[in-house]
Amino acid sequence: MIKSCDSEVSQQHFGAYYEILLYQFLKSLGYSADLHPELNGFQPDLLIRVENLNNPIIVEIATIFDDPHWQKEEHKFNLILDELSKINHYFLINVVVESEFIPENVDYTRLNEFVIRWLDSFDPGTTRELHQTKYKANALYLNLTMFPLKVPRKSSIIGGHSLPVRWIENIQLRRVLQKKIKKYKIAKKLNWPFLIAVSLTDAPLNRDDIIDELFGKMAFNIYRDQEGHVVNTKWKLSSNGLITPKPGLGGKARNTRLSAVIDIKSKWLERTKRGAPAKRAYSFSIIHNPYASAPLNIKFLEGYPQFVPVTDDDKSISMSWIDNDSELAFNC
């Protein structure tokens, strides 16, 4: 990934991209959508108006790359790139971080001297191949790739870089959902549906992980008597879901302002002919919150897969997918 050094938070680019994507997708379906409207002192990512629904729908975009730990690592990496970019030489370098965590204090003088000595060991007039080296000092591990310019000339050496190492797990998904859920108290006050659109593209997660974080994961429970003998075993949902009632709250559900979560997936399309631009196909599914104070009408995105309540009694709510075999997609 090539990125200029003056971009401090690349996560903002992910969010902005999916704002525009969702905006174009909804407009293609005939919905009225506004980007960043003013709303009683708040500015949601999207406000959607649907002709046959009474209230507008507030939408917030979320990507797991909003995680604050990653923001901190990226900030430290940008400081390194800023220092290296001050070096002028006849070669460019690509920088890859191999540290799990970048140290707080980096010896930039030592790093710059290492890079300069390394680049000085090559003749810009005759070097035509790529060369690699590793820099290791005080828990900072960098993989550096040097590549020559077609016409040798002195310039800033940074030619590209990859983002710092990112461990992608359910915890990042949970954090971003929690953060977005708490953002718009105005949604509950207005009694308007509030959606979070989540992109899990390029992450080893899927909509089942979203369901686990919202409703709780299945846990195997073992029940014992006073002597420690197993008297019963049962699979049941844990009570740590973001929206499920929590023991001790009298069965009261949490985060009822959230109406639903939209899962956005994508895949690259095969090119129809040589030289054709690369395109992605995006698919959308909706996971409804059965405890929402302002439920989302299933007429919204009708025909797309939706996880909805199918039975509801005093003791439990059963959820199931409708239109799960839908192959509707948006190409971009």
Image (tube, rainbow, N blue to C red):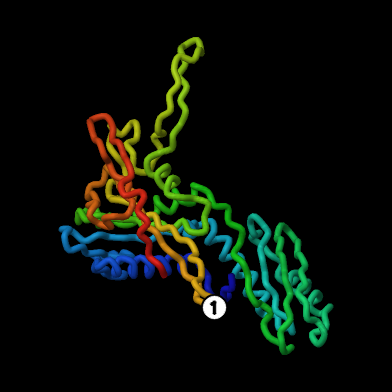
Task: Tell which of 280 and 252 is nearer to you.
Answer: 280
For mark 1, does the 10 Å Cα neighbourhood hold few (<14), some (14 to 19), or many (20 or more) residues? few
Residue 302 picture location, percent across and down: 26, 55
Please tell me in which quadrant of the rendered image residue 79 appears.
Answer: bottom right
Q: Quadrant of the C terminus?
A: bottom left
Quarter of the rendering containing residue 3: bottom right
Q: Is residue 215 visible?
A: yes
What residue occupies the far front of the structure in this picture?
273
| Residue 90 point in image, percent of width and height | 74, 84
Name the image quarter holding residue 138.
bottom right
Furthest-top residue in this view: 227
Q: Nearer the viewer, residue 319 or 95?
A: 319
- SS label for mark 1: loop
Report whether 124 appears left or right of 332.
right
Quarter of the image that includes the N terminus:
bottom right
- How many discs appear? 1
Can you see residue 153?
A: no
Q: Amino acid at mark 1?
A: Gly
Residue at x 42% of width, y 42% of height: 212
Q: Which residue occupies 68% across, 85% down?
A: 155
Front in this rendered view, residue 321 or 318:
321
Q: Give me the residue at 78% from left, 81% from top.
A: 128
208 versus 127 height, above or below: above
Question: Does residue 175 appear left or right of residue 98 in this picture?
Answer: left
Q: Looking at the image, is 83 positioned above or below residue 215?
A: below
Question: Where is mark 1, residue-wise?
Answer: 275
Q: Residue 184 location in percent, x, y?
A: 30, 57
Residue at point 27%, 68% (across, down) = 33
